Image (cartoon, grey):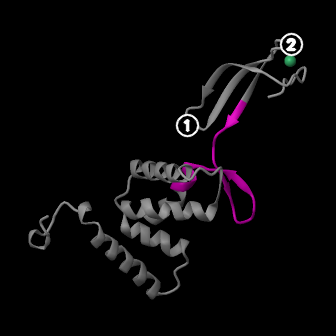
Amino acid sequence: MHCPFCRHTDSRVVDSRTSEDGTVIKRRRQCPSCGKRFSTMENASLTVVKRSGASEPFSRAKVVTGVRKACQGRPVGDDDFALLAQQVEESIRAKGVAEIDAHDVGLEILGPLRRLDEVAYLRFASVYQAFESLEDFEAAISLLRLEAQRRPEDTTATVSGQRDDQ
Ligand SMILES: [Zn+2]
């Protein structure tokens, strides 16, 4: 980081502070040459690239806005939205990319939303993946049923006669 006063090519960090949401790090630096202090902001947030080519910082609030409509009338509360947005952000960050297409953000929403509420998931998927016919819904519902069968550990009630003892 160049010193803004004397253009010295090095500086020393004297203090670091992270913003409340953890996405911005503010550092207080001192120039070892002229001794003046200055601040830098390091933005650790993800960039979302929209279809238009414009980019904006990833925002959990936008994720919530995106799914809230699909959850209308469903038993989904603010805590659920907050958790879902957190899961979406974590799964994107886990990819280790600094930039992600808006479309891919939508894809990351599908998984957590499906676990949260299947009706809301179907609504969201129908808009997001542009379902055009009843067949599209049927295919999505079949997939949900298949996955429900594949996850017996997710249900507390088990049918005793159908389990193989090992
Ligand atoms: Zn300086």
Of the residues shown, which amino acid type is indicated by label 2?
A: Cys
Residue 72 seen by the camera: no
C-alpha gap between disc 2 and disc 1: 34 Å
Residue name at image x 81 percent, y 23 percent: 10
Of the residues shown, which amino acid type is indicated by label 1?
A: Asp
The answer to whether 53 is drawn above or below residue 134 in the figure is above
Q: Which residue is mark 2?
A: 34
The answer to whether 26 is drawn above or below residue 141 in the figure is above
Residue 116 seen by the camera: yes
The answer to whether 40 is drawn above or below residue 87 in the figure is above
How far across and how far down the image is residue 163, in percent? 14, 69
Is ligand 1 closer than 8 angstroms to the Cβ of mark 2? yes
Mark 1: secondary structure: loop
Q: Which residue is mark 1?
A: 21
The C terminus: image quadrant: bottom left
How far across and how far down the image is residue 18, in percent? 59, 29
